[in-house]
């Protein structure tokens, strides 16, 4: 099972090793695209927080790709984890990517845009303009999204 079926490389690799691949996604448009790209695999429109059609203890590998689990509310994240463990076989594996709160980048309040100097004056000017333009946008986005962050001792 690949919860969040859109990743092209992930989907191809999992299809190669699985005889009963199931891609789950709550976006009908994404499921349509996956079915077109991989017509011999099974994809279902389904919310990861409620996978009623999937039997208990029936999935060996559950993959939640592209940091998808980090982009949902804490309450929904707990529902998803419970549901994944319901469908997972006793010796099954869960694979997911998420932000690491212990990384140095996580503790930084604001990250400067990347700036690469150049000996070419035209390229340097373009990079300086891009840097100057990105600064206020990054600051504004950071300020707007900061209110959505949830930080607790548990996560």
Image: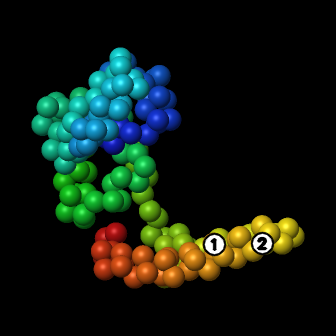
Residue 54 can be seen in this image: yes
Marks 2/1: CA distance? 10 Å
Compared to residue 153, the image places residue 1 above or below, namely above
Disc 2 or 1, which lies upstream in sequence? Answer: 2
Residue bearing the label numbered 1: 130
Q: Secondary structure at mark 2?
A: helix
Q: Residue 152: x and y, percent? A: 30, 76
Quadrant in which the C terminus is drawn:
bottom left
Q: Which of the 4 image quarters holds residue 57?
A: top left
Residue 57 can be seen in this image: no
Q: Which mark is residue 76?
A: none
Residue shown at the point (29%, 31%) measured from the top left = 32
Compared to residue 92, the image places residue 138 above or below, namely below
Q: Secondary structure at mark 1?
A: helix
Residue extending farthest to the front is: 122
Compared to residue 28, the image places residue 144 above or below, namely below
Q: In this image, 72 relative to 115: left or right?
A: left
Residue bearing the label numbered 2: 124
Q: Residue 137: x and y, percent? A: 49, 77
Compared to residue 100, the image places residue 16 above or below, namely above
Q: In this image, 98 relative to 42: left or right?
A: right
């Amino acid at each position: 099972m690949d919860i969040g079926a859109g990743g092209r490389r992930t989907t191809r690799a999992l299809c190669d090793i699985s005889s009963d691949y199931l891609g789950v996604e709550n976006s009908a448009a994404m499921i349509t695209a996956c079915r077109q790209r991989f017509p011999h695999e099974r994809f279902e429109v389904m919310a990861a927080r409620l996978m009623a059609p999937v039997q208990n203890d029936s999935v060996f590998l559950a993959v939640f790709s592209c940091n998808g689990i980090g982009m949902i509310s804490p309450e929904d994240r707990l529902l998803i984890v419970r549901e994944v463990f319901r469908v997972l076989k006793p010796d099954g594996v869960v694979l997911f990517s998420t932000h690491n709160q212990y990384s140095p980048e996580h503790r930084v309040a604001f990250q400067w845009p990347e700036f690469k100097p150049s000996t070419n004056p035209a390229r340097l000017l373009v990079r300086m303009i891009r840097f100057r333009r990105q600064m206020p946008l990054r600051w504004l986005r950071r300020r707007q999204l900061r209110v959505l962050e949830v930080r607790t001792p548990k996560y």
